[in-house]
Image (tube, grey):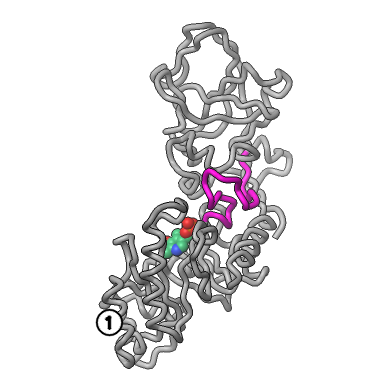
Amino acid sequence: MMPADLPDSAAFGATLTIDLDALISNWRLLGKRAGTEASAVVKADAYGIGIEPAVTALAKAGCKSFFVAHVSEAIRARKVAPDATIYVLNGLLPGAAETFAAHGLSPVLGSHEELLEWASFRQTGAQVRPAALHVDTAMNRLGLWPGEGLNLARERSGVIAAAGIGLVMSHFASSEVETDPANARQIAAFAEIAAALPEVPASLKNSSGHFLKDCPSYQLTRPGYALYGGNPTPGQPNPMKPVVGLEATIIQTREVEAGTQVGYNGRWTAKGKRKLATICLGYADGYPRNGSWTDTSTGGSVLIDGVSCPFVGSVSMDLIIIDVTDAPADAAKRGASVTLIGGPLDLETVGGGAKTIGYEILTSLGRRYQRRYIGG
Ligand SMILES: *Cc1c(COP(=O)(O)O)cnc(C)c1O
């Protein structure tokens, strides 16, 4: 708890604002666009925004199905969504069936072995919810081969029936690249599987899948990134509302002369007289060290009053140095706040500046920020 006399902005280096109304509105937009039910993928702490607030808000808005990666995440989601269907994408680890039953969770079964283990658990009379079946149409990661899936699906009274499958699904490998020919191949391979299991609801679309042409929506979609404001159509305008904003405070400013080396190992050198500021967040807050801006590589930036101010030198554990020479002096001073995520600094831009993708920026969001939830 905060001492009553210490303002929040002085107690924390940075503030993460999470707009739960925007989250709900993104979920509704995707469901409308698909013309079918949308679930919510809330793995990795709801892509960093917090699984409990995200699931609570989405369940209240009418979302009935959630996907997580691990059982531990599913148990957290279950606490705030007592009636929802909660699928565990990583499936059934040996001996885990009892835990699935105890919390009413649904494994996403991805191999013949998992199907057999779940089917024999059901045969003991255990009360379980329907499981999902994962067919791998491109990734070579998790799921049955399409041929294996088709063979099992055609055995009418076989292991698929015994496992109590309530959903059949597959996952796109490149749906954000509309022109990738893998998309059409995956759509066709999955159509065959879905047709072989006509009584089982099916699910194919991830976030970007909602924007692919000629892709059926089936009965359920599985958006993640776009729910949290990520752009599912990279290179085109983002149809989603921003959910996450990140602001940090300037602690110090200073002027340096040409030739001054800045930060750990002096990896950035001032080319002229510059005004620098130090802000209080760093790689320990999940801001990638690959966002460092050195003499030989570009990196991240912040916005001050709409002016882009680049990082200079290495991103430190708790601090980043920025070049505020071009920012208005009264907006670039001790105690002032700067934007790290927000407006034109969207998730894709921030990801690019740190040589990674927006997904990784989101899922790395630090635990040490002051977190402000609005709406919901
Ligand atoms: C993570 C994941 C999703 C969500 O993908 P986004 O690109 O974030 O929308 C959907 N399905 C599976 C199987 C996943 O692993």
- Label 1 residue near ligand 1, CB within 8 Å: no
Residue 43 appears in the picture as rendered: no
Tell whether position 109 is magenta. Answer: no
Task: Assign a secondary structure to mark 1.
Answer: helix
Name the main secondary structure of what is drawn in magenta.
loop
Q: Which residue is label 1 attached to?
A: 151
Horizontal and vertical percent position of residue 16: 62, 44
Residue at position x 60%, y 48% in the image: 238
Taking the image as shown, residue 151 lies to the left or right of residue 57, namely left
* Of the pair 251 and 167, the residue shown nearer to us: 167
Horizontal and vertical percent position of residue 326: 64, 18
Horizontal and vertical percent position of residue 34: 58, 67
Q: Amino acid at mark 1?
A: Asn
Q: Which residues are magenta?
A: 225-246
The residue carrying pointer 1 sits among few (fewer than 14), some (14 to 19) or many (20 or more) residues within 10 Å by Cα, namely some
Q: Quadrant of the C terminus?
A: bottom right
Picture layout, residue 279 above or below residue 241: above
Residue at position x 37%, y 76% in the image: 192
Residue at position x 34%, y 89% in the image: 162
Tell whether position 245 is magenta. Answer: yes
Picture layout, residue 312 above or below residue 71: above
Picture layout, residue 98 above or below residue 3: below
Horizontal and vertical percent position of residue 18: 64, 50
